[in-house]
Image (cartoon, grey):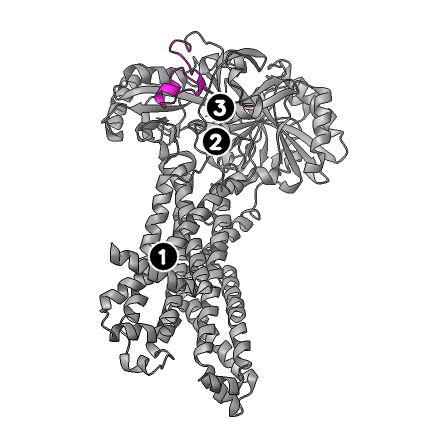
Amino acid sequence: MRHLIQDLRVALRGLARSPGFVAVAILSLGFGIGAVTTIYNWTDRFLLHPLPEVADSDRIVMLQTVAPGGGTWAVSYPTYRDWTERAQVYDGITVTSPEQVGIRFDEGVVSSFVLLTTDNYFDVFGVRALHGRTFQAGEGRRAAQVVVLGYDYWERRFGADPSVVGRQLVMNGNGYEIVGVLPRRFGGNYVGLNLDLYALVDTYPALLGDSPLERRGSQFLEAFARLKPGLTIADAEADAKRVGAELDALYPDDANQPRVQSILDQGPPATMRPIFYALFAVTGLVLLIACANVANLLLARATVRARELGLRRALGAGRGRVVRQLLTESAVLAGGGGALGILLAYLGRNAMLAMVPPTPFPIGMEFPVNGRVVAVAVGLAALTVVVFGLWPAVRASRPDLVTVLKDVTTGSKGRSFARTGLVATQVALAVVSLVAAGLFLRAIGQSLKVDLGFRDPNHLLLVETDLRVGGLDENTGPEAVDQLLARLSAVPGVERAAANTFVPLGWSCCRSSNARIDGYEPAEDENMSVTYNLVSAGYFETMGIELVSGRGFDPLDRTGDDVAVVNEAFVRRYWPEQQAIGRIFRQSGRDFTVVGVAKDGLYRTLTDAPFPLIYRPFGQGYVSGLTLTFRTSVDPKSLAETLRREARAERPDLPFAGVRTMTESMQQATIGQQIGSRSLAVFGLIALLLSAIGVYGVMAYTVSQRTREIGVRVALGAARRDIARMVLRQGLTIAGIGVVIGVGLAALAGKAMEALLLGVSPADPFTFVSVVGLLVVVAVAASLVPAIRAAGVDPMRAFRAE
């Protein structure tokens, strides 16, 4: 311990004499450690511990229904009850359905998101109330109108007032008693969302004006379960086969087989996992570049200190003693870098949320810098001591005593080669980082240029509303929608307006129902569930969707014969090489005659192939939750307040919520790529900066070591521009070697990321040329100052210094 303290004191005194060196080393390491620690923090919260308030979250599984012909469906309420009665491996099963509702406050009706669920929901997830209570056993059977508030909603709408428990809340015109408030870090079972409130699914008919709970074909619920202690997913899968076989015997026409998977294998965690892998890879490169920077600085410092270290060896200090002293100095630098890294991770903990595009849903997560995050930063700091400190320490501990005691400190070719190699390595790693970021950015840009199936999303405005909130039903709702659209269409700047239930590439969920197609014989176990969109008259003109044949809808279709428009994918699948106009299919208990065929489009994501889609007139099918779509001749956002004012004048009880442009709505289709591209761009720029520092450092050091040589060249008549050109050439040679190596590595990295790139080749020439050009510019800039300094060397001063 005494020797350790002594080494520490010597290290601190020595480093204090080189504040510039210390600042650059700590900043380099801090950025590297901070980058990796930040990504670990995001990964820990989003993938490893996505439900921090849930006890034993690894025991939570998601249950889905195995669809005929493969794939999965949601769960019906009767099927959920059957699973609850028959399954033997769970401590409890619950179902959920997120819904948008209107809640009356003093300022009017406010759109909010409620999670409808069962009375054992909080028991399954192991969550207790912060204030009041959660649901009680038996309240589901009674369809008790009670509600539990999410923490953020309680804080935002009720000022974090604990006395809110016991008050009444008017939701969709129904009175609900507030019985509790949830803890801060629980936002529901949907990772990344922060739901406003929770009510019992048994109140669905009263709250939403529909009665799907008794229909086995109404598969609209997501099911979650808690495994009994000691059991695994394999045990649950075996139990699911038994339960499915029993139910198949009772209900042969229904889908009954449960599919079991970890809650982390679905939804946002599954989508974001490859993005986080890419971020880890790039931040790891940033850390390696930082370590190479510091190693280069230490090699240069060791050359300057060669006489000091030689004297120590001459006076009897062993190599181990010298290595230990130098590693202590490295540990001090790593400690400073680790501390800075933790600070940067703390400052950047919520940066991921800032990169999420606008959504109508309440997004919310916390990324606390907890003990696990600090432990990772400390571990990285310890690792960097070995990565950047050991090699320079070993090299510095074996000086040529004769040379250094004669005060010859110009350095060896070996050390010069090592420093050059480290800088070339930095440049190569920077190329990989920047190419990865560039490919993601190019993918985002290219995604908006694909054929979407509709025209000019930049002039479309979307607004969410719900007819239930205004006391409307299937008898009064369609006419009220027509009147509202007629008024809003008259607003100056609005070219057309329509209503629909499904927004392409947006957040709203598409609906589907089994269909029987005239003239089509389905294969055994073929899934005949077909997606449909309820739309008002003028929808195709508003969206700019081309009709390949036939016609769209007009106002008379709402009350006339049952008609429909299908897309090209529907025709290709069910009526290939046949005329579709006039053909009939049956869906939702009604026979529809096809009057038009619409061009295919992109519906869920930018990479999915078009699937069969049916457009049906709103009124010949009814859903209370609608999206109002406006095509404008001006900036859509500039009309938002005018449209809101006119909508309230026409229907003051209807919510006017989730206002966004179509371009903003489409961003959800690339949300993972957007978060990845923005993060990678930041880390790529950090890698570029560190590489620039490396090039500058090695060139500045080279010039300082060659001062006498440059002075002699100038004295013998060498032009100063030739001296500057020589230094620039050396800097560009080092960068060029790194670029060549980096391009090869980047090509391999691009191939590994190919699945994440939308419409962009992993060897995209534009990206590679741009990155190479940027690095050449940076290398020139980093070499320019040392080159100018070299060209300005005074021969007389150089000789006197020697």
Q: Secondary structure at mark 1?
A: helix
In the displayed structure, would residue 609 be above or below residue 465?
below
Q: Is residue 495 visible?
A: yes
Q: Residue 140 at what x, y percent from top left? A: 42, 11
Distance between the alpha carbons at the discs numbered 1 and 3: 45 Å
Which label's residue is closer to the chain start, 1 or 3?
Answer: 3
Instruction: Look at label 1 and name its amino acid.
Output: Val
Numbered disc in front, either 1 or 3: 1
Which label's residue is closer to the chain start, 1 or 2?
Answer: 2
- Locate residue 395: give its quadrant: bottom left
Q: Residue at x 29, y 56 (%)?
A: 5
Is residue 376 part of the magenta span, yes or no? no
Residue on which the image places disc 1: 332
Residue on which the image places disc 2: 193
Distance between the alpha carbons at the discs numbered 3 and 2: 11 Å
Magenta region? 113-140
Is residue 137 part of the magenta span, yes or no? yes
Residue on which the image places disc 3: 150
